[in-house]
Image: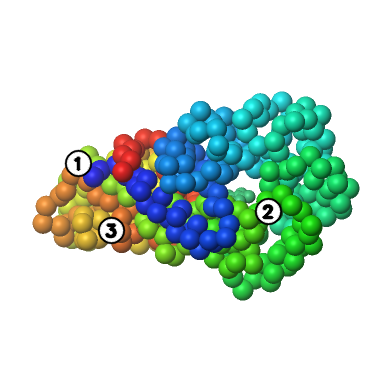
Amino acid sequence: MSGLVIDLAAIQANWQALAGLAPDARAGAVVKADAYGLGADRVAPALYEAGARDFFVALAAEGRAIRPLLADDAQIFVLSGHMEGEDLSGLIPLLNSPEQFFRDRALRPRGPFGIQLDTGMNRLGLEPGEWAAIRGEALAAGPRLVMSHLACADEPEHAANAAQLAAFRAMTGGVDAPRSLAATGGVLLGPDFHFDLIRAGIGMYGGLPFADAKPVVTLSLPVIQTREVRPGEGVGYGYSWTAQRPSRIATVAAGYADGLARALARQGELKLWCGTRACPVIGRISMDLITVDVTDLPDVPKDLAILNAAQGVDALADLSGTIGYEILTSLGHRYTRTYL
Ligand SMILES: *Cc1c(COP(=O)(O)O)cnc(C)c1O
C-alpha cells in the first residue's frame, strides 16, 4: 500500500507485550507529540480498546484534543504540569515544582493531580528538598501518581539507573499513591523499575530499545517520473551525483519537508525499496523530491518504500545520526495516511 501505513494492531500488540513484561504494574501509554507523530486521535482510542486507561501527553492542549475520544475512566496525565492559564479540565497535571503545586492547589483545590520528582535527570520535577517541604500537604491531598523519569534507561549498564532507582525509593518510601519510574527503557531494566505503573512510549511505536517490537509503520513514496541519463550527466542540486553508466532515475514525491532529512542521503547509503530489491538514493534530498537509481530494476514500480521490513525507523535513524523517536515525530502531514 502506498503512503504512510500505520498498523494500529501492531501498536496494540506492542503495548500488550510491554504490559506483559511488567505483569504487576498497570501499563500506561504515552501519546505525546500526536502519538509520536502517528496520530493521537487514532492511536489513543486504539490503546483504550486494548485496555490502556492511563495516558500521558506533554501539553494540556494535547490532552484536551484526546479527552473527548476516551471514556471517563481514562486518566490523561499532562507531563508539563500546571502551566499558568492552562485549562486542565478532564486532565491530570503532573506538578513539577513548588510553584506549580501551590498554583494548582489554589486554582483547582479538588482537581486531580500527580507529582513529578527529579531523581537526577535535572530536567523536570521536584528536587528532594522541594519535595520534603511539600510532601505532607501533597500526600494528604491524594495524588493520582508520583513519578520520576530515567535519564539513561536505554543503557542498561549505566550507573545512573541504579542511582535514580535508589533516589526514587528514598523519595517515595511510605507513599501510598501509585508510583511510576519506567518508560520503555525502564520496563526492560526489570521488575525493580516497574513500581505500580509503566509509561510505554517508543516501544509501542516499534522503536528501540524494545528490540522485540513489531514494526508499526511502512512508508512508500509515489514515483512521479522516470528518466534516462547518460554517463557524465549530473542529477539534482549541486550535481552531487553524476552518472557513471547509462542510468534510469526515478523521482519520488517526498523530501526533507516530510521528515526525510537531507542528512539521510549524505553517506550515500540510503536505499529505497521495490519489494526486497534495494535501489540507491542518489543526489541530494530536496524539499519535496528524492531521486533514486532504478537502473537495475526490470520495471519501475508505482512507488518505492523508504520504511519497510528491511529498513525500519531505527535503521533510517542511524543513517542520519538520530534516533527512531525523531524519525517518527518528523514524518509530517503530506503523506496519504492509512490505518490498519
Ligand atoms: C516520553 C516520555 C515517556 C515515554 O518514553 P519512551 O522512551 O518513549 O518509552 C515516559 N515518561 C516521560 C516522562 C516521558 O517524557
Question: Looking at the image, which residue is at 31% across and 61% down?
Answer: 310
Which residue is disc 3 drawn over? 280
Which residue is disc 2 drawn over? 179
Q: Position of residue 259 (x, y in %)?
A: 43, 44
Of pointers 3 and 2, the one earlier in the residue sequence: 2
Residue 299 versus residue 327: which sits nearer the camera?
Answer: 327
State whether residue 124 is above or below residue 193.
above
Q: Secondary structure at mark 2?
A: strand
Of pointers 3 and 1, the one earlier in the residue sequence: 1
Q: Position of residue 269 (x, y in %)?
A: 35, 62
Quarter of the rendering containing residue 63: top right
State whether residue 155 is above or below residue 242.
below
Q: Secondary structure at mark 1?
A: strand
Question: Looking at the image, which residue is at 61% across and 36% down?
Answer: 59
Which of the two discs, 3 and 2, sits closer to the camera? 2
Q: Position of residue 210 (x, y in %)?
A: 47, 62
Which of the two discs, 2 and 1, sits closer to the camera? 2
Compute the Cα span from label 2 to label 1.
55 Å
Residue lying furthest right in this view?
A: 133
Left or right relative to 237: residue 44: right
Which residue is disc 1 drawn over? 225
Q: Is mark 1 within 8 Å of ligand 1?
A: no
